[in-house]
Amino acid sequence: MNRASLGWLGIVRLGLVQSAIGSIVVLTTSTFNRVMVVEMALPASLPAALVAWHYAVQLSRPRWGHGSDAGQSRTPLIVYGMGILALGAIIAANATVAMQNSPTFGILLGIVAFAMIGAGVSASGTSLLALMASRVTPDRRPAAASITWIMMIFGIVFTAGVGGAMLDPYSPQRLVLVASAVAGVAFVVTLLAVWGVESRLAAQQIEATEPASSFRETLREIWKEKLARDFTLFVFVSMLAYSAQELILEPFSGLVFGYSLGKSTQLAGFQHGGVLIGMVLVGLLGTLLRGDKTQWMKGSIVFGCVASALALAALAVAGFVRPMLPLQPVVFALGFSNGIFAVSAIGLMMSFAGAGRQSREGVRMGVWGAAQAIAFAIGGFAGAAGLDVMRHMIASTPTAFAIVFATEGVVFVGAALFATRLGRAQARTAMLPPGVAGSLQ
């Protein structure tokens, strides 16, 4: 199959879809969570359970990926998924409002809404990444991964800023109106972003059709591939470490360093600033450097994971030497390291998605996306629960945080070790004579 590749404009246009996804998801995971807990005085476990439920639904990612592989175009599934996501966000806003006066009805409606959100993210996000994996040339993958994720963060930051301003002063009607506006704009942006992209690519390529396989058969074939299994394990372990500090970093700044709410929020700005700079650096270096981009991205992942582990070790120590080790630069270093690791992992994911005897980018992206969703669901809960357990067992709050941060650092080191093993078997096989190599696959 001779496939036409995406140009820089096409990559940026598809990045707008990630911006749209991020703008809706930040409402469901942050804004609705805040409203339920603060304005409505509901138990914090309720929004946490709904967010965990939306991650659980994302176990459907491989199935959506198979659907995008089987179709003539991935664009319809991207648009369909965004439609489900946008509608789910609007229903979630109404469910949040309904919980005030009709808790049972509101919670049931919320379960339906967050299922739609999880399904929409799975369908649109998996199909989008599969399209990019199949149509971005290897030399552009580091920059493409950076552009896509930077634009997603931009969508989150823009919606949090503008949407947050529009929500003040809070009222239930205003919440539904803002959520509906964000969802509607995100859907329109998606339509404009994907319009004509695949049709132009199709006009430039020669297609060779392959016999269709069932989902179970395709999944079974992919799981037999050592590279796919190894990368699934790497994604799970690395994202477990990546997400475990998400819910405890701001409490750490308040309980141990005495930060106010406003100062803790500013601390998140240091972290996200570091993430953005790390992502931009990977994109620039990955584009400018010559040689094997896959090996370069593996090295960048290892560096990012080890640097993240060192930053977490510094956080663990910071609680005991507060006057000598300021928190802001350590948190910036953690964000910077996370940005390098995360965007390199996405670039490597694009490279590995088309590997194997047959192109199954959608299913492979779906399997890895499902592993990421499970890791995020477990990681956020495990980090917070681990802290609660340690604080119950140990009288010293800095010690409790230090144990949790150190554990996360160890998991990052494990992820770095997994990353060094990725693709080794394929590299050894490529060096063998064709007949021998074929007998080993």
Image (cartoon, rainbow, N blue to C red):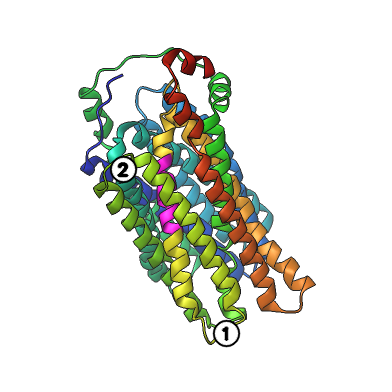
Pointer 1 and pointer 2: residues touching (CB < 8 Å)? no
Is residue 301 in view? yes
Residue at mark 1: 258
Point out the tag, 1 or 2, that comes first from the N-terminus. Answer: 2
270 sits left or right of 379 in the view: left
Q: Amino acid at mark 1?
A: Gly
Q: In the displayed structure, would residue 101 be above or below residue 228?
A: below
| Residue 6 quadrant | top left
Q: Secondary structure beneath disc 1? A: loop
Residue 438 lies, with reference to residue 164, above or below; the image says above
| Amino acid type assigned to the residue bearing label 2 in the image | Leu
Q: Which residue is mark 2?
A: 14
Q: Is residue 168 left or right of residue 376?
A: left
Q: Which residues are magenta?
A: 338-348
Above or below, 423 relative to 438: below
Where does the image place residue 64, in percent across and percent down from the top left? 49, 32
Q: What is the spatial separation of the Cα atoms under label 1 and label 2, in whole angstroms?
A: 42 Å
Please report the residue visible at 40 percent of the width from the left and 23 percent of the height from the top: 71
Quadrant of residue 14 in the image?
top left
Residue lying at 52% horizontally and 85% vertically, measured from the top left: 324
Is residue 343 inside the magenta stretch? yes
Of tags 1 and 2, the one toward the viewer is 1
